[in-house]
Image (cartoon, rainbow, N blue to C red):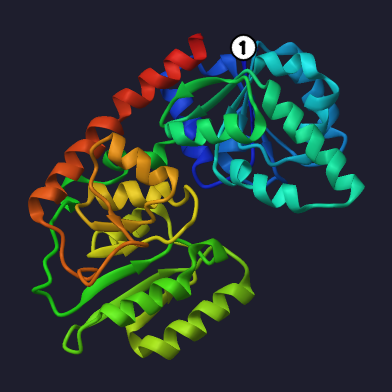
Amino acid sequence: MKHLHIMNDDKFIEPYIRFIEEYFYFQKHKFIILSKNNKNSYYNNKKNIFQYHSKKDYLKILKDLYLTDNIFLHGLFNRNIFIILFTNPWLLKKCKWILWGGDLYSYKKRLKKRKLKSKIYNYMIFYVIKNIEGIITYIKGDYKLAQQWYKTKANYYKCICYLSNIPSYNIPKTNFKINTHNKEHIFIQVGNSADPSNNHVEILDKIKENKNENEKIKIICPLSYGKEDQKKKVIKYGKKVFGKDFVPLTKFMDLKTYNKLLSNIDIAIFNHQRQQAMGNILTLLYLGKKVYIRDDIVTWDFMQENDIKVFSFNNSNNDLLDEIDSEVAKKNRKKIDFRFNIDVFIEEWSNIFNS
């Protein structure tokens, strides 16, 4: 076994494994999914895909870590994996961390923990990240933050990581249209989940301030992910301010349905104070939408470096609800398609597997 992948089960994991099967020598890869058996027929029909969840299973993982040449950690969230790597530090020279976002940005929360047990665990996390062989991400700013916060010596591997970051792979070309405000309503997406990091209330207040009396709007608010109490708070506030024009989406949609929804959005506003919602943002830009993000996060820097036009939410003025210029929208689409496409995806993963 040459490549061992350790991953939580998420919506983009199965497409990733299928991609490996289609474009690479599949039998050189073993996939360990840290979840209870979810009766996924694709997983269950493959001899090199395992779903582990019991404490005994971690002994099997430890054995596999020694037997493989390369270890790919898809997100660093699992306490037991941290403990295994801390107590077997010589394995770290084989480990590459595919950075998800929350695993990196939990740094600030970790610093606030005062209990001895938490401090010991945090020491393990810092040691593992500091000494890991490589970090895989397409956002160099996140890698630099890992260097700054964890003093990591890891090598940087630029990679799109998952198919969900390739809009042209997931969306038919016929879906591209520049929406104009000639239609009855302006459709505005607010955030991408019920997580408090979306800062929904601030966005809703700003829309209210900038909305003209005669403008008809529909606010589309994805809330399928996140805690129920937070969903209720956002819905209550949204309905209070905008009534029936606030449309919460509380049920999970498959990717095809969700992308169809995004194709009807005019303006999308994200108020995360860190890199987040990149799949949404890339898709919306590819579809020619006007996208607002904060200008004090690494996502903004990434867009500037790649000459992709996004708008500042925290420093915006009264043009919040103005439509995007059609030429800007077309240019954004070309830039996204140039950087995020299946050929680049295959090339980047080939380079990593051969490194």
x, y percent for residue 113: 79, 52
Residue identified by numbered label 1: 2
x, y percent for residue 33: 66, 36
Q: Quadrant of the N terminus?
A: top right
Which is more toward the observer, 105 or 26?
105
x, y percent for residue 139: 43, 34
Up-down relation of residue 346 to residue 304 (above or below)? above
Which is more toward the observer, 292 or 3?
292
Left or right: residue 200 versus residue 263 is right
Residue at 47% across / 75% down in the picture? Answer: 201
Which is more toward the observer, 17 or 47?
17
Up-down relation of residue 318 to residue 262 (above or below)? below
Q: Quadrant of residue 195?
A: bottom right
Q: Secondary structure at mark 1?
A: loop
Which is more toward the observer, 146 or 161?
146
Q: Is residue 195 visible?
A: no
User: How many labels sit on residues?
Assistant: 1
Up-down relation of residue 218 to residue 88 (above or below)? below
x, y percent for residue 131: 70, 21
Residue at 44% across / 13% down in the picture? Answer: 351
Residue at 35% across / 75% down in the picture? Answer: 206
Residue at 9% across / 54% down in the picture? Answer: 326
Kind of residue indicated by mark 1:
Lys
Q: Callout 1 environment at 10 Å: few (<14), some (14 to 19), or many (20+)?
A: few
Q: Is residue 10 visible?
A: yes
